[in-house]
Amino acid sequence: MVYMTILLVSAHDDPRSLMGALLNTALGVLERAGHKVLVTDLYAQGFNPVASSLDFKTKSTAQANYMFEQQRTINTNAGFSPDIQAEMDKVMQADLIIFHFPLWWGSVPAIMKGWFDRVLAMGFAWNANARFSTGLLRGKKALLVTTAGDPASFYTTEGMHRASIEQHLYSLAHNTLAFCGIDVLQSVIISNTTAASDSELTEDLKAYAELLGSIDQETDYIYRH
């Protein structure tokens, strides 16, 4: 057993939902296994997803690109807003980050997209000379855990959505996480949630718990730098 610090980032407004059950399952299994677990419940925290000049304790005198302001803040140690800094501190501690979210419009909910925009800042997670294998968060791992209301057959080249859920998640896995140097594990995908029976959902939760029980040994990667 390799003990890790694991950050759980969740995006769902109802703790009684399947997503809430997945988060609780992860928290229970990982803590019982002896891992240190940090939690970011975006809705419960009222996380602000909107990137703006308020994200910086000081502002440059000239009109600046948001990402360049991020880099300036890192370079000058000027300081980010407390909510961003708190999340950055969690990311720096984490060996593994697990993202829990429902698939909305083929991607993550806006509140989680805002987390990526604001927290994975230029100069903190990446910069012009540090991307992918040289990204500033190299050595960390990520796992995407998502749910979809439609059945798996809808997510095929012949199905309604004309693409798999893995293809829908490609930009997040590749252009965000791998871009920052993070190794990305094979995603956990639960489909057909709107029509699934309670027993089927219980089996999905059991399978997820089994995966997490040996997550420190998991070697099935989408991207490994």
Image (cartoon, rainbow, N blue to C red):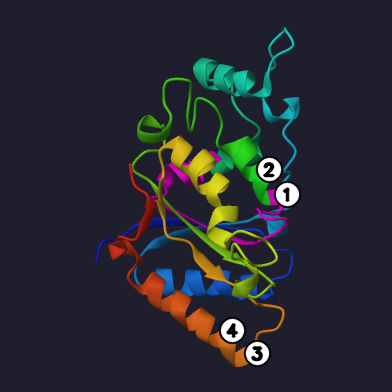
- Label 4 SS: helix
Q: Residues within 10 Å of mark 2 (few under 14, many from 20)?
A: some
Q: Residues within 10 Å of mark 4 (few under 14, many from 20)?
A: some
Disc 1 residue type (three-letter) = Ala
Q: Which tag, 4 or 1, sits closer to the chain's start?
A: 1
Q: Which tag, 1 or 3, sits closer to the chain's start?
A: 1
What residue did someone put label 2 on? Answer: 114
CA distance separating discs 4 and 3: 6 Å
Instruction: Tell us which disc is closer to us: 1 or 3.
Output: 3
CA distance separating discs 4 and 2: 29 Å
What residue did someone put label 1 on? Answer: 110
Disc 2 residue type (three-letter) = Gly
Q: In which quarter of the image is residue 162?
A: bottom right
Q: Which mark is residue 197?
A: 3
Residue 22 lies in the magenta stretch: no
CA distance separating discs 3 and 2: 33 Å
The residue segment tinted magenta is 88-111
Tell me if residue 41 comes above or below residue 214 in the rendering.
above
- Label 3 SS: loop
Residue 112 x/y as whole percent: 65, 50
Q: Quadrant of residue 52?
A: top right
CA distance separating discs 1 and 2: 6 Å
Residue 36 x/y as whole percent: 40, 60
